[in-house]
Amino acid sequence: ESEALLDNYIDYEITGILDTGGKEEDYVYMTLPDMESLTGRETSYDMCELSISTTSDNLEKIADKINDSVGNVSARLVKRVTQSETTVLTKLQALVLLVTIVVLALTMICVATTMTAVVAERRKEIGLRKALGAGNSSIIAEFMGEGVALGAVGGLLGSFLGFAFAQIVSINVFNSSISFVPWLIPVTLVASVVVTAIACLIPIRSATQVDAALVLKGE
């Protein structure tokens, strides 16, 4: 009898320990072929686990809806997983917001510096135009138009590059992809144009203050 038991002995290796904070920690997990081989019968299901990428509040609503509408089914959340994902998501959103604010501030500084350099390089041109009768409004329109155009191009590129970056982060952190939201493109374009226009105000103001007489004298 002992030899028969040894012949039926199967050696299994523990590959990991599940830590969820719930009843799942009391279970033993194995592949379906191993389960069928151990029990000698086809596998039947009494529990299924489903991963959904959403907030913990939405997960609770989904679980309540399943419990109310489907009979003989008890849906519940793996609390530690949902809480940890919510914590990571909240911190990630705060980090992205902080990075966005810093990037916008740096963008304004870079645009202001670039436009100031452009005004300095084209000082003679501005003076000549003023001497020929060009008003400040035309000078403002020219430089503001250049700045807004560059801001629009940067916003358009930033929309697609930002989506690509968010997709990479989502896949690496949450093992799930995200969908593209089209209405973010105009929002990004408007934000980029507004930031660029604000950054151009000081350089454009210096351009309107160019003295045509001094410039033509070479001073």
Image (cartoon, grey):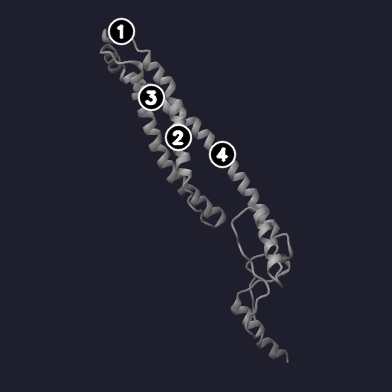
Disc on the earlier residue, 4 or 3: 4
What numbered label is drawn on residue 97?
Answer: 4
Q: CA distance from mark 4 to mark 3?
A: 27 Å
Q: SS class of the residue under badge 2? A: helix
What numbered label is drawn on residue 192?
Answer: 2
Name the residue nearer the viewer: 24 or 144. 144
Height in image: 192 above or below 172?
above
Comparing marks 2 and 1, which lies closer to the viewer?
Answer: 2
| Dots 4, 1 in contact, CB < 8 A | no
Q: Residue at x 36, y 28 (%)?
A: 145
| Dots 2, 4 in contact, CB < 8 A | no
Label 1 sits on residue:
214
Disc on the earlier residue, 2 or 1: 2
What numbered label is drawn on residue 66?
Answer: none
Disc on the earlier residue, 2 or 3: 3
Q: Is residue 19 visible?
A: no
Q: Is residue 205 left or right of residue 216?
A: right
Q: CA distance from mark 2 to mark 4?
A: 15 Å
Q: CA distance from mark 2 to mark 3?
A: 16 Å
Residue, far bottom? 1
Height in image: 144 above or below 38?
above
Q: CA distance from mark 4 to mark 1?
A: 47 Å
What numbered label is drawn on residue 115?
Answer: 3
Three-letter code, disc 3 = Met
Three-letter code, disc 2 = Ser
| Quadrant of the frame with the N terminus | bottom right
Three-letter code, disc 1 = Leu
Q: Name the image quarter holding residue 143.
A: top left
Q: Name the image quarter holding residue 214.
A: top left
Comparing marks 2 and 3, which lies closer to the viewer?
Answer: 2
Disc on the earlier residue, 4 or 1: 4
Q: Residue at x 66, y 52 (%)?
A: 84
